[in-house]
Amino acid sequence: MRSACAALTALLLSVGAWAEPFELSAITINGLQRVSLGSVLRALPIQEGDRVDSDNADEWLRSVYSTGYFSDVRVLRDGDELIFELTERPSIDSVEFSGNKTIPTETLERVLNNVGLAEGEIYSQSLLEGIELELERQYAMQGRYNATVEPEITPLSLNRVKVELDINEGPVATIDHIEITGNEVFTDDELLDTLRLRESSSRYVFQWIARRNRFGQAQLTGDLSRLEDYYLDRGYLDFRLESHQVSIADNKSDITLIFNVFEGEPYHVSGIQLTGDLVDLDEELNGLVDVESGDLYSRVAISNISSAITDALGARGYAFADVQTQLDPDREARTVDVTLSVNPGKPVYVNRIEIRGNSETNDEVIRRELRQLERALVINRNIRLSKGRLERLGYFKRVDIRTQRVEGRDDLVDLIVVVDEATQREISGSIGYSDVSGFFTEAKMQQKNFQGKGYDFSASVTVNSTEQNYNLSFEDPYFTVNGVSRGIDLYYRRTDFSQATFSKYATNTAGGRLTLGYPISENQRLNYALGYSQDELFLSDSAPQEMTDFKDANGDDYEIIDARVTWNYNTLNGTFKATRGRQMSLSTEVATPLGDLTYYRLTGNAEQYFPVNDDYSFRLHTDLGYGGGYGDADTLPFYKNFYAGGVRSVRGFRYGSLGPLSTPSVDENGDDLTDPSPIGGNIKVLYGAELLVPMPFVKDQSSFRASLFLDGGNVFTDQCRTDNETCQEGIDFAEMRYAAGVDVTWITPLAPLSFSYAWPLNAQDGDLEKNFAFTIGLSY
């Protein structure tokens, strides 16, 4: 702009009319389109009636340019009048992005809005160039050194431009080599194992999943801290990282990291004491100190003591207790004296509880799960319990609980509970085909949190070539204010396996069940149920001997009155998206002598999640069962057997196809009428493992659950007929079946979709395999 002003001033001075000062009679502005006349006149340091000369021309030009609205400014004189010829900068009609994946478009738009590169703003080439450099810097922090930003400016009518940014993010640079120098006490391998970043040639098995060979500035910063922690947790107080270098190869894809360390000598603790205000808890707080004189100093051990003291004070309402660590090292003796200064602050109370985000769920439903109450002391453990209970409801995709200080008070906080509602009403359907049941269809209407009051209601219909199942259920989880639940189930089921490959019977069952649940702790419940059903049994002419024996002994029409007791334990941090915690259930089902059949079934299942990091979690699970008869009955009714195979047990094998084979019925000559077929068993052993992984190429993971799984198990029997040559009593681990595969569930706004593909690992001759399974539904 300076050079333009100087050139123009020289041009004006060459005109003789500018040689003498004159009184300005008028100012004329030409070339305005969007900018108002007033904006220009306010920027000019002159007005009509002023006495002006050519010495001030440079100042006038700078004033108009400084508005930022104009790309060219010229001033001319006509008598005693000054004429400003202006060329406006174009305005931005739109800003569009393409090619960006790791940085969302919403984030880019927000950043550009903040700096003035947005729709309606004045276009500036210099600003655009600065933004290009900033975006490339942001990608470089992710390790994407080959990222480029190519702008395309398209002129439009009315002095407007369209800005398009074509982004090529490029690949993330990978670690080619990591080198550590200066270490003598610990080997390279020991130190490299502490780092999250790995060489591409590393032996780390899941490197390709965890992407630990990809370089990023955040990961590097974390590894610098991990390296420091490693030494300080082993007493090396004088440790320091002398330097670190990041070398980028010419291809901008290979990274070499070099860490230069100074180790020093290890220190031992000469003494440790607590100071400050211990609020009459001296004995308890000192009891938390588990480090003694002579122990090797460990920063993590001292940090754990500080956390334990903070938790102990927090359990008594000192929510903002602070513990400061002071170290007094003796360099010659290589010892360190540790002082923990305790400042409990004031006891803090909850002023009020504010609930946000619950567009459908009543406040009462949320409040009754909270263990932190208004006007009560803030207990951090109660806040954690409250968050866990809300997550396990299944009503919310996300739950966040935080404290917010009350202005002007240091003893009061507001508790802010923020929830993100999940889909609570669902109509789902599935359609598919299997060699066992042929084409099938299922429709289900489920209303969690009915009318926002926490009631659960569902109705379902399943129809296929072998089964018709109609079910209604209702549960009130807070029948009483103490958390006693009640529920009712009504069902009617017709099954006909006479045409299936593995069974030759049909049943009609109608019944209902009443349930009551009692909380026995924050994470445990006991549920009691009493049920009644009317069962009818129909056998085909070629039914196996186990079925005909049962019918001969018990008839074909039964009234069953059963009682159930179930114990549940649950500390999971969610339902669909759980990543940590455990769940266990033990159940006893007994068909009482008040009915026509007497039998029992004992079942148990458990699952445990182990978080690996923010993106990955490992799950172990098992499902066990055992059944039998009592009284006049010595066996479990065959149609109450456990079955294995299918999406809910061992994927990769067809539903119900695993386990013991039946004894074929014979004709009058003793020849088998049918081949042996799976009949289920009274013993169930299922287990498996899953690695929960992020869904590839998806930004928002909240609606996805993807896993790599290993399923194992089978069903067995201890009720073999003596003439069944294929039947082996008891559990035979050599007969366990295994399958591995991938499973994906996607909760979309329109339809929940679930897919699994499994590869049987040890299928035997005669096993019925099924690799692919899916369900499709509709949510509203």
Image: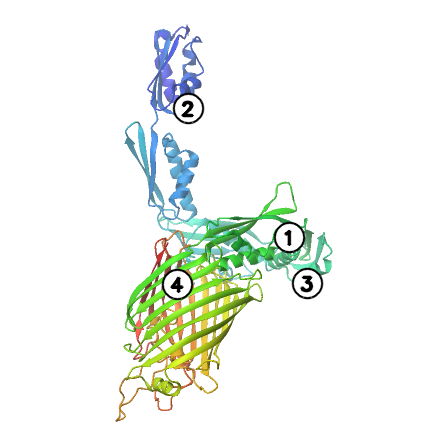
Q: Please give the name of the residue rendered at 39% of the width and 87% of the height, measured from the top-left corner.
A: 553
Q: CA distance from mark 1 to mark 2?
A: 58 Å
Q: Say which residue label 2 marks.
A: 67
The answer to whether one can see residue 313 in this image is: yes
Residue 519 versus residue 109 in the image, above or below: below
The answer to whether one can see residue 757 in this image is: no
Q: Are marks 3 and 4 in contact (CB under 8 Å)?
A: no
Check residue 459 in the rendering and tell me which mark sits there, or answer none: 4
Q: CA distance from mark 3 to mark 4?
A: 67 Å
Q: Position of residue 432 (x, y in %)?
A: 29, 66
Between marks 3 and 2 in the image, the one whose residue lies nearer the viewer: 2
Between marks 4 and 2 in the image, the one whose residue lies nearer the viewer: 4
Q: CA distance from mark 3 to mark 2?
A: 71 Å
Q: Secondary structure at mark 1?
A: loop
* Most foreground residue, 772 or 186: 772
Between marks 1 and 3 in the image, the one whose residue lies nearer the viewer: 1
Q: CA distance from mark 1 to mark 4?
A: 42 Å
Q: Quadrant of residue 204?
A: bottom left
Q: Are marks 1 and 3 in contact (CB under 8 Å)?
A: no
* Most foreground residue, 550 or 509: 509
Q: Secondary structure at mark 4?
A: strand
